[in-house]
Image (tube, rainbow, N blue to C red):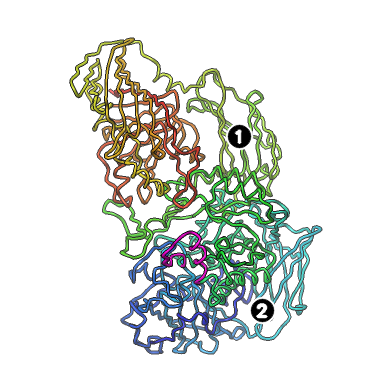
C-alpha cells in the first residue's frame, strides 16, 4: 500500500500536526478587518483554486507515487479546492441518517476505500520577519496524508477540525508542489455518522501562515463582570521562548479602554475595562483586542458576557434568556459541504430576518469564520463537536427490546475506552479553536452517540479547561442499565422532540438542570405544526430555556433543470446508493436554494419580539408584552396598525414616537389607538411591528411580526359571505327527471345530474357551461405530508385513500320553492366496513345555488381522518381564486401564525407550495367564502361556520404518488377541495404524536355550506 494504514488505527489520529489552538490570522500590521478580510493579511497565503486531481475507486489502486517531485500530472483532471469530489462527478452521493454506510466493524472500514489524489503547484515568497510557515487545512473529509515537495509532512483526521502542520523545513522560495491523498473512510468515520449526505474531499479553505520564530502561539480570553467593571484575562502560550507582548483593547469607536505590555505573569495578562458594554444577541457589542509582539500582530474581537445557571434557570448577563434557535448543517445543493463567507452571511441574514436568535452547529464545528459572523451579527451558539456514532444503535440483536437496545447501544464506542482518546481529541479540537468566541455559550459533546466513559472524559476535560460556559450532551440519556455514570459535568438536561406534557412534567421535578430542546418541531416538508404551543411552554416556565428547530435547510443535490426549466433536486436513493434514508434530509425551514418554507414564516411570527396580550375594545387600549431580553422596544422598533372590514382597510397609521410608551425587556405597557368599528362586517385590528433602524443584516422598516385582534360589532358576519348565503326570492321552476340511478334537475340557468348511488352530483352545468369535469366526490384523503409519515400507514390500512361514497336511499321533494334531495349514505372501501355514515340534504335554489348539509358519524374503530369535505374537478380555465380567510400563505389548524384574515386573490398555480417531495399543501383555513373563476364561469362557496379549501392543478393522487416535484404532471383541470377541516400538521416525522386538539377525531359533526355558480358573461 502506498501509505501506512493510519486510517484504521484508533491511536494515531494525527501525525506531525501542531497542538490544537485558537483560531486567528496573524499579520504584520493591523490595517484591516481580520475577521472577514483575512486574505488581505500579508502573513496569509490562500492555496484555494483548481488543483490537479485523480479519483481512485480503491486505495489499492493508487500505485504511482504521485507526490514525488517531477511526477507528471498531465493526465490528471482538475477540481476546485475547496470542494467535495462527488459534486464533480467522482464516486457517488449517499444520504443516510443514522445507519453506517459500511459494515459496523470498528476500527476497520471497507477495504476498497475510495480516495482522491490532489496535486497543487504554487509559488512561495519567504519573508525575513516571518520565516516560519504553517500549512492549515480547515476541513477534509475523512482523513488525509500530505507531502510537500516530495517530502512526507503528516496525516490527520476529524473532518470538521483544523489541522495545522509546520512546513518550515520543507517549503522553499519559489516553486512548490503540495500533494494530498484524501480517503473516503477512516476509523474516524465511525464518529462522523451525522444525518447528512456523505461527501469527500478538501471541502474547506487551505492556506499558509507566515510566522516569526517567536510569538504568540495561543491565547484564551475570559471575562468576568462586577461593579461596573469587566475583568479580562488573556492566558497566553508562545512559539519558542516567552517574549514581551502588548495587549490593547479598543471600543467600537477605536478608543483604547485597556492596555498592558510586558511578560505574562503565570502565563496570563489581566486588564480592567470600566463601564463595559456587554455582548448579547440583541446588541452584539464587540471590542477589538490586539496582541503585538516584535514582528507580528494578532487582532481579534472581544465580547464581554457571562452565562450562568441559578436555581435551574439560564441567565446571560444576569437576565433570564430563551433560545429561539435552529439546527444548521453546512449544506448547499451545488457546493455541498463547502460554504463560502457569502453563503454563511446569506443564512444568517435570513435567520435574523425571521427572529432566530440561536444556532446549534449540528453536528460538528462550522468553519471558524462562521463564529466571527455570529459574534458580529448576534447569535447564541451551541458549538458541537464532530462526533456522532448513531450507527452503533443498529447492531443486530436477536431480542431487540428497548431495554436491550439501550444497554448495548453505547458499548461499541461511547462506553469503549479504546475510543476515549478520539472522543476527547474531537472535543479539544472544538473547544481550543472556538474558545475566544463570545457567541459560543454552550459546548456540546456531539450528537446521538449514547453515553459512557468516553464522554465522561470529554466532559471532565471541558469543564476543567473552560468553566465559563455551559455544557450539553443529549446522548447522556442513553445508558446501560447496570452501570453508574457520572453526569456531574453536564449543565443542561437536553431532549429531542418531547411533547409539551413531557416538558411540563419535567418542570415539576426537583432538579437543578435547565431543560433545553436541542431538537424539536421537525420541519420536514409541510411543517412544522404547533410552534405556538412550544413558544408558550418556553415562556411560561423559567426552567425551560428554549429550543432549536430541526432544521435550517433542506439537504439536496442540484441536478440541473428539466426541459421546461424546473430545477431538479435529488435526495437519498436517487443515486443508486445503499443504505439510504430517502427524503429524510429534506427537513428544513428553507429550501436548498434558501427560499423560505412557510414553516420559517410561521417560526418568524411565533417568535415576534412583541405581542398583544390583551385588548380593551371600549378603551381602544392594547396591552403589549416585550419578549426581548435586553432591549427597550421603543428604541428597537415601531408599531403600525390597520383596521379592516371584510378585507377592506378602513383605517391605518403608525404610532408616533411621543405616543409610544417605554416597553422595557420582559415588561408590559398599554397603548391607546383611535379608530371606529363599522356596525356590520368581519372586522380586525392588525398590529405590525417594524425595525426602527437598520442593523448589519436587516434593513430599517423590515417587518418583525404582527398580531391580529377580532373586533366586535353588531353584525360580525362577512357581508359577502352573508349575501351568498341569503335565500333568494326567486322560487321554483324545476324540471325533474328520475331513473334508478340519477335525478336530473333543470332550472332556468342550470342543469344538474345527481347520482343516487354515490349521494353526490355527477354533472353540473350553468348557463350551458360545464362546472364539473369529473363527478363530485366526498373526500377524506390528503396526499400525506412528511409529518404524516407515521399516521399514513394507519390511514392506508384503513383504506382512506380508496374510500368512496355509497348511497342507500334517496328521496326528493319541492319545498318552500326549493328542491331538496336527501340521501342516506356511507363512505366505504374494500374490503373493510363502513368508515363514515352520512345523512346528506342537498337544497337546490331556483338560481342554481346548492346548499349541502352533511351530518356525519365516524366509526370510532378508525383512526383520525386526514380531512373531510367535498372534492370538485373544475375546468382548467377556472384558475383564479378570491377568498376571505387566513392568508396569504398556506395555513392549517396548528400552522397558521404566518397568516392573517383578509380578502386575498391569487392564481391556482401560485397557491401551490412546491415541496420537493410532493404532498398536501396550499390549504387556506378559517374562510367565510371563496370564489374560483375563469373563462365564463365562477363558483363561490360560503358557510356560516368557517371552512378551509385547497385549489390545485395537481390531483391529490398525483401528489401522493410522485417522489419529486419536477415529476408532477398537471391534471388538466382544477382540483377544488372544500373542507370541513383537516387533521393538523404537527412534526411527527421525527417528533411527538400530533396533539389531541389538532387531531380530526370528532365522532359526529355537521358540515354545511352553499355553492353558488355564476357566469362572467
Nearer to us of marks 1 and 2 is 2
Point out residue 147 in the picture as x, y percentages from the top left corner: 46, 85
Dot 1 alpha-carbon crowd within 10 angstroms: few under 14, some 14 to 19, many 20 or more: some
Using the numbered discs, state the Cα–Cα distance from disc 1 to disc 2 in whole angstroms: 55 Å
Q: Is residue 616 left or right of residue 768?
A: right
Residue 23 in view of the camera:
no
Q: Is residue 323 at all visible to an observer of this figure?
A: yes
Local secondary structure at mark 1: strand
Q: What's the magenta region?
A: 392-412
Which of these two is toward me, 604 or 273?
604
Does the magenta segment cover residue 362?
no
Q: Is residue 139 positioned above or below 571 on the image?
A: below
Q: How far from the left and from the top, in percent, is residue 157?
A: 49, 76
Q: Residue 892, located in which quarter of the rendered image?
A: top left
Q: Determine if the magenta segment contains residue 407.
A: yes
Which residue in the protein does label 2 denote? 216
**Residue name at image x 48 percent, y 41 percent:** 895
Number of numbered markers: 2
Image quarter of residue 753: top left
Identify the residue under disc 1. Answer: 654
Front one among 1013 and 451:
451
Q: Quadrant of residue 947?
A: top left
Amino acid at each position: 500500500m502506498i501509505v501506512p494504514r493510519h486510517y484504521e488505527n484508533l491511536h494515531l489520529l494525527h501525525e506531525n500536526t501542531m497542538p490544537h489552538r485558537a483560531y486567528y490570522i496573524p499579520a504584520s500590521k493591523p490595517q484591516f478587518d481580520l475577521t472577514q478580510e483575512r486574505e488581505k493579511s500579508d502573513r496569509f497565503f490562500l492555496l484555494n483554486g483548481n488543483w490537479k486531481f485523480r479519483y481512485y475507486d480503491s486505495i489499492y489502486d493508487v500505485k504511482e507515487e504521485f507526490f514525488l517531485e517531477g511526477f507528471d500530472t498531465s493526465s490528471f483532471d482538475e477540481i476546485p479546492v475547496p470542494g467535495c469530489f462527488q459534486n464533480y462527478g467522482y464516486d457517488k452521493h449517499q444520504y443516510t441518517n443514522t445507519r453506517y454506510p459500511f459494515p459496523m466493524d470498528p476500527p476497520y472500514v471497507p477495504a476498497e476505500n475510495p480516495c482522491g489524489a490532489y496535486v497543487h503547484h504554487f509559488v512561495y515568497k519567504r519573508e525575513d520577519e516571518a520565516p516560519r510557515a504553517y500549512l492549515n487545512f480547515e476541513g477534509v473529509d475523512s482523513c488525509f496524508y500530505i507531502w510537500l515537495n516530495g517530502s512526507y509532512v503528516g496525516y490527520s483526521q476529524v473532518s470538521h477540525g483544523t489541522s495545522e502542520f509546520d512546513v518550515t523545513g520543507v517549503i522553499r522560495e519559489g516553486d512548490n508542489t503540495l500533494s494530498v491523498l484524501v480517503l473516503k473512510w477512516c476509523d474516524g468515520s465511525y464518529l462522523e455518522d451525522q444525518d447528512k449526505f456523505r461527501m469527500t474531499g478538501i471541502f474547506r479553505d487551505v492556506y499558509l501562515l507566515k510566522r516569526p520564530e517567536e510569538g504568540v502561539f495561543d491565547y484564551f480570553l475570559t471575562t468576568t463582570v462586577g461593579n461596573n467593571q469587566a475583568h479580562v484575562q488573556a492566558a497566553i502560550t508562545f512559539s519558542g521562548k516567552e517574549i514581551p507582548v502588548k495587549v490593547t483593547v479598543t471600543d467600537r469607536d477605536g478608543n483604547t479602554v485597556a492596555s498592558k505590555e510586558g511578560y505574562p505573569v503565570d502565563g496570563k495578562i489581566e486588564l480592567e475595562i470600566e463601564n463595559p458594554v456587554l455582548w448579547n444577541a440583541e446588541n452584539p457589542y464587540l471590542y477589538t483586542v490586539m496582541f503585538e509582539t516584535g514582528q507580528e500582530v494578532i487582532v481579534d474581537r472581544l465580547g464581554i458576557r457571562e452565562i450562568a445557571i441559578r436555581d435551574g434557570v439560564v441567565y446571560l448577563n444576569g437576565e433570564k434568556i430563551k433560545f429561539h434557535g435552529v439546527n444548521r448543517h453546512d449544506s448547499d445543493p451545488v457546493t455541498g459541504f463547502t460554504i463560502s463567507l457569502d453563503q454563511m452571511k446569506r443564512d444568517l441574514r435570513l435567520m435574523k430576518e425571521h427572529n432566530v436568535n440561536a444556532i446549534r452547529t449540528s453536528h460538528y464545528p462550522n468553519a471558524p469564520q462562521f463564529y466571527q459572523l455570529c459574534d458580529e451579527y448576534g447569535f447564541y451558539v451551541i458549538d458541537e463537536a464532530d462526533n456522532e456514532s448513531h450507527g452503533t444503535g443498529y447492531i443486530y440483536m436477536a431480542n431487540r427490546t428497548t431495554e436491550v437496545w439501550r444497554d448495548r447501544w453505547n458499548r461499541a464506542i461511547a462506553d469503549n475506552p479504546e475510543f476515549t482518546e478520539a472522543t476527547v481529541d474531537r472535543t479539544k479540537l472544538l473547544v481550543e479553536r472556538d474558545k475566544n468566541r463570545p457567541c459560543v455559550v454552550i459546548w456540546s459533546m456531539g450528537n446521538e452517540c449514547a453515553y459512557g466513559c468516553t464522554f465522561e472524559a470529554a466532559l471532565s476535560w471541558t469543564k476543567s479547561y473552560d468553566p465559563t460556559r455551559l455544557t450539553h450532551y443529549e446522548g447522556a440519556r442513553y445508558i446501560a442499565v447496570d452501570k453508574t455514570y457520572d453526569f456531574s459535568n453536564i449543565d443542561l438536561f437536553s431532549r429531542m422532540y418531547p411533547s409539551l406534557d413531557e416538558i411540563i412534567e419535567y418542570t415539576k421535578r426537583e432538579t437543578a438542570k435547565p431543560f433545553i430542546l436541542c431538537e424539536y418541531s421537525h420541519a420536514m416538508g409541510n411543517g412544522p405544526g404547533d410552534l405556538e404551543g412550544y413558544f408558550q411552554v418556553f415562556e411560561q416556565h423559567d426552567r425551560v430555556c428554549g429550543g432549536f428547530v430541526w432544521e435550517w435547510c433542506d439537504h439536496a443535490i442540484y441536478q440541473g433543470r428539466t426541459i421546461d426549466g424546473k430545477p431538479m433536486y435529488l435526495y437519498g436513493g436517487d443515486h443508486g446508493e445503499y443504505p439510504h434514508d430517502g427524503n429524510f434530509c429534506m427537513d428544513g425551514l428553507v429550501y436548498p436554494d434558501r427560499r423560505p418554507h412557510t414553516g420559517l414564516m410561521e417560526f418568524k411570527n411565533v417568535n415576534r419580539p412583541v405581542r398583544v396580550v390583551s385588548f380593551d375594545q371600549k378603551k381602544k387600549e392594547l396591552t403589549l408584552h416585550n419578549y426581548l431580553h435586553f432591549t427597550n422596544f421603543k428604541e428597537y422598533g415601531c408599531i403600525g396598525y390597520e383596521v379592516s372590514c371584510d378585507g377592506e382597510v378602513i383605517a391605518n397609521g403608525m404610532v408616533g414616537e411621543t405616543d409610544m410608551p417605554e416597553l422595557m425587556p420582559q415588561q408590559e405597557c398599554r397603548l391607546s389607538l383611535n379608530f371606529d368599528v363599522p356596525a356590520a362586517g368581519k372586522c380586525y385590528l392588525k398590529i405590525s411591528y417594524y425595525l426602527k433602524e437598520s442593523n448589519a443584516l436587516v434593513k430599517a422598516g423590515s417587518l418583525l411580526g404582527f398580531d391580529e385582534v377580532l373586533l366586535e360589532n353588531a353584525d360580525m358576519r362577512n357581508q359577502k359571505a352573508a349575501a351568498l348565503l341569503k335565500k333568494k326570492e326567486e322560487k321554483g321552476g324545476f324540471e325533474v327527471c328520475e331513473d334508478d340511478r340519477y335525478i336530473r334537475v333543470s332550472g332556468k340557468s342550470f342543469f344538474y345530474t345527481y347520482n343516487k348511488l354515490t349521494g353526490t352530483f355527477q354533472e353540473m352545468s350553468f348557463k350551458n357551461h360545464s362546472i364539473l369535469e369529473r363527478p363530485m366526490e366526498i373526500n377524506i384523503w390528503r396526499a400525506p405530508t412528511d409529518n404524516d409519515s407515521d399516521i399514513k400507514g394507519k390511514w392506508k390500512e384503513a383504506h382512506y385513500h380508496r374510500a368512496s361514497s355509497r348511497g342507500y336511499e334517496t328521496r326528493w321533494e319541492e319545498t318552500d320553492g326549493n328542491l331538496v334531495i336527501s340521501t342516506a349514505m356511507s363512505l366505504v372501501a374494500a374490503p373493510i366496513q363502513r368508515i363514515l355514515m352520512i345523512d346528506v340534504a342537498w337544497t337546490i335554489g331556483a338560481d342554481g345555488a346548492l346548499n349541502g348539509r352533511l351530518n356525519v358519524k365516524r366509526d370510532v374503530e378508525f383512526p383520525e381522518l386526514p380531512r373531510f369535505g367535498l372534492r370538485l374537478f373544475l375546468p382548467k380555465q377556472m384558475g383564479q381564486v378570491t377568498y376571505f380567510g387566513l392568508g396569504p400563505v398556506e395555513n392549517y389548524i396548528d400552522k397558521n401564525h404566518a397568516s392573517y384574515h383578509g380578502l386575498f386573490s391569487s392564481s391556482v398555480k401560485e397557491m401551490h407550495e412546491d415541496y420537493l417531495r410532493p404532498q398536501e399543501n396550499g390549504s387556506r383555513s378559517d374562510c367565510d367564502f371563496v370564489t374560483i373563476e375563469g373563462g365564463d364561469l365562477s363558483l363561490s362557496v360560503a358557510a356560516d361556520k368557517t371552512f378551509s379549501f385547497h385549489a390545485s392543478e395537481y390531483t391529490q393522487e398525483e401528489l401522493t404518488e410522485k417522489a419529486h416535484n419536477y415529476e408532477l404532471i398537471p391534471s388538466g383541470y382544477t382540483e377544488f377541495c372544500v373542507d370541513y377541516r383537516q387533521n393538523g400538521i404537527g412534526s411527527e416525522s421525527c417528533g411527538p404524536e400530533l396533539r389531541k386538539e389538532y387531531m380530526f377525531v370528532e365522532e359526529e359533526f355537521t358540515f354545511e355550506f352553499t355553492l353558488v355558480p355564476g357566469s362572467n358573461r
